[in-house]
């Protein structure tokens, strides 16, 4: 009996009607265990007619979930139209695209149900992100149930919900407890007082029904109520129930009977009594709470025996389900089978994009390390360490690599020992130990070179080249790239060919040969695009964008960064999107487009996955520099914070904040304080071959009076100015497109140049430097020096800039981004990022909500 849920069913029906008109939605159905989430969804599906297709799947409560279990369920449904899904042999994003295409191309509204997403594996969480962000323009209603009372602060579902719940296409339904009236209706003529039942159960529907079905007395726990119900059926049928309890989700009827030697009549009794439910082929409990209650009550010896027998039955199947085999092997304590199946399940998880689950399988196998052959343990720990590094747990990866090295040393396996060192060097760099990373990489190379040409030696040279590139030591990096290329060709190591080309192009870009480097990176991008390799596409776009930005090839960099954002949004590559936006913030700052720099930086601040990674560091350093150059409050404080964050990063990521701090002190007249921190950064810059690091950091050392002229190989515009050639310096900066730097150079020139600088700075809104140059002119005896414009004491409503208010006004007129771009004579991309910034500042996620807020804001203006 479904009580007090009819309004919720009607809500679901309303979402489906919208989907039928092409406006799909993600519906999150939340409630505690036993609240009736599944009953609600089943009632809704039962209300549908033949015009709607319903497809159901669920996440596994296995020791370690099967990767993409809901998709496997969808594919197994003959009516779903997804039977040809190739879940394991393609990139996950392509599989997700097939599901979305199914919802977009169908003429029938379609309901997809995923039960119990609190058990979702990593790849299924990626599926939720992908679908939730895109389902709005489909005929699909994706309903996901989960236990909201089990989501701790570190639960992996939490950040996914945080990303999806603000979207207009995401709906939330909370399933409440039953009221006293509903409980009284259920209790009917039972001897139990409804008020006592409410007090005991808290209105939990599952608990209520189990109490009423199991006993005339009040049990004290859900388990007591479930076991009381089971106890009312004959013992042979109870054995069937016990067999089903060890199989999360469901168990084949024949397997359940075989496990305990039951008859068809014994199985039928479990169904007619309501203890189990079935579909003719499988048996399952009505609720996971009931299954867990029965399993937990099994005597240890009986539970062990059932899991052991289950392993025997699974081994007879034509296709192994490695995750299920590993689950039962772990429960049975069968060390030999855990060793056999857990690593295979881990490989399967990696192939499907569930690296977190792969880690759990490797860790499960290693719990039996005392029974493992040392060589097997070495290989398992090596694979575990690799996955830990990839998922962003470098400290844990280092611990495992160190254990691998100890095992390899005890076996005399120098190749494995050195290979572990090579890969550990990457993890050491991630945790902020670049010097230790370099030393570890060098040790690995020395060991491997003595063993002759091997794939491990090629990888070690590639890793060394990568670390030198990050440190901006070009000659060293190029040497190791050349050695990598030779070994790759000699040994035929296909998986390093593309990576080596990308690295070579990056080295050329950032260390002095921009044209050649950009050409190599473009070739790598085109190859990745031809292969449809999303990871490589993102890597190439990121290198072209950030590398081009660093050497101030702005037009090419902006194009690639915008492409990277589009690609990242399409493939849910959140880090790549954040890093691309951070570089757009830095470039906008350098080009004098300061409103846009602030907008990009604020978007990164709100959306970056990690607030202390290189994305946040790059974006917020640019924001700090804008504040300094405008004379806005908080610039120095923000830059100081970025310098603390940057202590664990390479110079390339921190020199912008270093220079911003020095500039602030110079503008304030505190020249004697400038070299604090700046001098150390200058020494680091001289140890690199980065012309732009040497140039910009050297420039501020020159402004501080710490050096008399440009360092060797400084970037040309900075070198010209430090050499006293302010006129050609200004021309060089004008050609590059940096108006503030043009004004800085002119400020060192004659009276006419200084007056030009003041005019340019006033247009930029660079009050501190403009005031400084005005003072220079007055000190030189010039009269008629214009005063700076008075600053408005009244901020625009909503914190929007004038341009953003203009864009918002045009949005209210119903204009698209393209139409607004035409009206304002700007690029469509520029309008898109203005719109994104408006969303962020107003705290909205959709165009409709921004427009709804517009009348008040525009009236205040």
Image (cartoon, grey):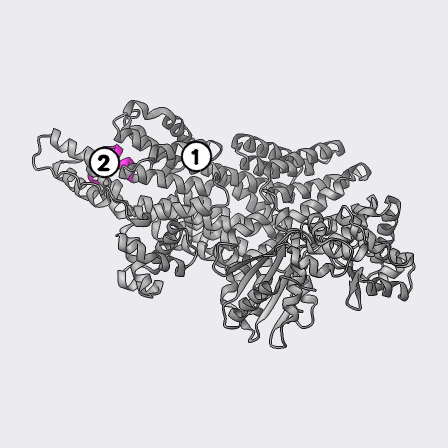
User: Which residue does the image show at 43% across and 55% down from the upper left?
Assistant: 845
Q: Which residue is mark 2?
A: 769
In percent of width and height, residue 650 lies at 46, 35
Q: Nearer the viewer, residue 68 or 495?
A: 68
The disc, 1 or 2, on the residue closer to the chain's N-terminal end is 1
- Asked whether, in this view, residue 30 is left or right of residue 811, the answer is right
Q: Nearer the viewer, residue 132 or 648?
A: 132
Q: Looking at the rendering, in which quadrant would you find the N terminus?
A: bottom right
Say few, some or many: other residues with alpha carbon within 10 Å of mark 2 (under 14 / 14 to 19 / 20 or more): many
Queried whether the magenta region covers residue 725, the answer comes back as yes
- Asked whether, in this view, residue 746 is left or right of residue 78, the answer is left
User: Which residue does the image show at 60% across and 74% down from the upper left?
Assistant: 52
Queried whether the magenta region covers residue 698, the answer comes back as no
- Asked whether, in this view, residue 280 is left or right of residue 438, the answer is right
* Magenta residues (range): 717-728
Most common secondary structure along the magenta stretch: helix
User: Which residue does the image show at 40% across and 58% down from the upper left?
Assistant: 849
Q: Which residue is mark 1?
A: 651
Farthest top residue in view: 672
Compute the Cα span from label 1 to label 2. 26 Å
Dot 1 falls on a residue whose secondary structure is: helix
In percent of width and height, residue 17 lies at 53, 71
In percent of width and height, residue 291 lies at 77, 53
Q: State the count of labels.
A: 2
Dot 2 falls on a residue whose secondary structure is: helix
- Asked whether, in this view, residue 762 is left or right of residue 475, the answer is left
């Amino acid at each position: 009996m479904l009580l007090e849920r009819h309004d919720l069913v009607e809500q679901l029906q309303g979402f489906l009607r919208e989907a039928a008109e092409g406006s799909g939605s993600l519906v999150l159905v939340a409630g505690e265990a036993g609240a009736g989430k599944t009953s609600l969804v089943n009632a809704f599906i039962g209300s549908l007619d033949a015009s709607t297709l319903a497809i159901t799947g669920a996440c596994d409560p296995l020791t370690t979930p099967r990767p993409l279990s809901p998709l496997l369920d969808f594919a197994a449904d003959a009516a779903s139209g997804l039977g040809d899904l190739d879940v394991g042999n393609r990139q996950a994003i392509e599989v997700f695209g097939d599901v979305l295409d199914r919802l977009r191309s169908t003429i029938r509204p379609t309901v997809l149900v995923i039960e119990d997403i609190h058990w979702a594996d990593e790849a299924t969480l990626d599926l939720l992100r992908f679908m939730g962000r895109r389902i709005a323009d489909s005929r699909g209603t994706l309903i996901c149930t989960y236990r909201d009372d089990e989501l701790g602060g570190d639960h992996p579902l939490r950040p996914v919900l945080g990303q999806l719940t603000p979207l207009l296409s995401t709906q939330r339904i909370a399933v409440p407890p039953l009221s006293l009236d509903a409980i009284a209706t259920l209790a009917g003529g039972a001897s139990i007082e409804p008020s006592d039942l409410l007090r005991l159960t808290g209105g939990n529907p599952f608990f209520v029904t189990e109490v009423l079905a199991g006993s005339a007395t009040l049990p004290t726990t859900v388990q007591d109520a479930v076991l009381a119900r089971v106890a009312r059926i004959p013992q042979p049928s109870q054995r069937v129930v016990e067999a089903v309890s060890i199989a999360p989700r469901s168990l084949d009827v024949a397997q359940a009977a075989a496990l305990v030697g039951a008859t068809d009549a014994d199985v039928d009794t479990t169904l007619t009594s309501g203890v189990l439910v079935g579909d003719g082929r499988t048996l399952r409990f009505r609720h996971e709470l009931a299954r867990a209650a029965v399993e937990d009550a099994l005597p240890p010896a009986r539970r062990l025996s059932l899991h052991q027998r289950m392993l025997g039955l699974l081994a007879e199947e034509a296709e192994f389900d490695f995750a299920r085999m590993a689950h039962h092997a772990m429960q049975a304590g069968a060390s030999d089978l855990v060793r056999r199946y857990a690593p295979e399940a881990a490989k399967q998880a990696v192939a499907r994009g569930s690296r977190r689950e792969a880690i759990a399988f490797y860790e499960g196998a290693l719990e039996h390390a005392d029974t493992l052959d040392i060589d097997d343990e070495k290989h398992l720990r090596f694979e575990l360490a690799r996955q830990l590094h990839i998922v962003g747990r470098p400290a844990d990866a280092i611990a495992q690599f160190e254990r691998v090295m100890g095992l390899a040393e005890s076996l005399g396996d120098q190749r494995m020992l050195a290979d572990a060192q090579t890969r550990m060097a990457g993890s050491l760099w991630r945790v902020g130990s670049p010097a230790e990373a370099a030393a570890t990489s060098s040790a690995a190379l020395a060991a491997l070179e003595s063993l002759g040409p091997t794939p491990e030696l090629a990888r070690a040279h590639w890793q060394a080249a990568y670390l030198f590139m990050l440190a901006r030591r070009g000659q060293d990096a190029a040497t190791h790239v050349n050695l990598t290329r030779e070994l790759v060709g000699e040994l035929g190591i296909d998986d390093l060919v593309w990576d080596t080309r990308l690295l070579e192009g990056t080295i050329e870009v950032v260390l002095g040969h921009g044209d050649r480097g950009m050409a190599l990176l473009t070739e790598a991008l085109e190859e990745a695009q031809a292969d449809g390799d999303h990871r490589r596409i993102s890597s190439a776009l990121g290198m072209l964008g950030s590398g081009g930005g660093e050497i101030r090839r702005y037009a090419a960099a902006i194009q690639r960064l915008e492409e990277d954002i589009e690609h990242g949004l399409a493939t849910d590559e959140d880090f790549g999107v954040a890093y691309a936006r951070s570089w757009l913030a830095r470039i906008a700052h350098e080009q004098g487009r300061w409103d846009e720099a602030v907008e990009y930086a604020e978007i990164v601040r709100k959306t970056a996955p990690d607030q202390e990674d290189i994305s946040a560091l790059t974006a917020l350093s640019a924001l700090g520099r804008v504040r300094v150059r405008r004379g806005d409050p908080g610039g120095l404080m923000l830059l100081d914070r970025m310098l603390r964050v940057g202590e664990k990063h390479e110079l390339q990521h921190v020199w912008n904040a270093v220079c911003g701090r020095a500039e602030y002190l110079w503008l304030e007249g505190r020249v004697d304080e400038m070299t604090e921190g700046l001098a150390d950064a200058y020494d680091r810059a001289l140890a690199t071959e980065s012309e732009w690091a040497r140039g910009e950091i050297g420039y501020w050392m020159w402004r501080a009076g710490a050096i008399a002229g440009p360092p060797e190989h400084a970037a040309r515009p900075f070198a010209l100015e430090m050499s006293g050639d302010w006129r050609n310096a200004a021309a060089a900066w004008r050609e590059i497109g940096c108006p503030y730097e043009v004004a800085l150079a002119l400020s060192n020139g004659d009276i006419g140049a200084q007056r030009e600088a003041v005019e340019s700075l006033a247009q930029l809104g660079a009050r501190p430097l403009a005031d400084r140059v005005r003072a220079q002119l007055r000190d030189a005896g010039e009269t008629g020096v214009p005063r700076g414009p008075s600053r408005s004491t009244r901020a625009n409503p909503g914190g929007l800039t004038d341009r953003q208010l203009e864009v918002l006004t045009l949005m209210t007129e119903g204009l698209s981004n393209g139409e607004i771009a035409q009206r304002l004579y700007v690029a469509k991309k520029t309008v898109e990022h203005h719109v994104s910034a408006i969303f962020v500042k107003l705290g909205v996620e959709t165009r409709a909500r921004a427009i709804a807020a517009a009348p008040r804001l525009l009236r205040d203006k």
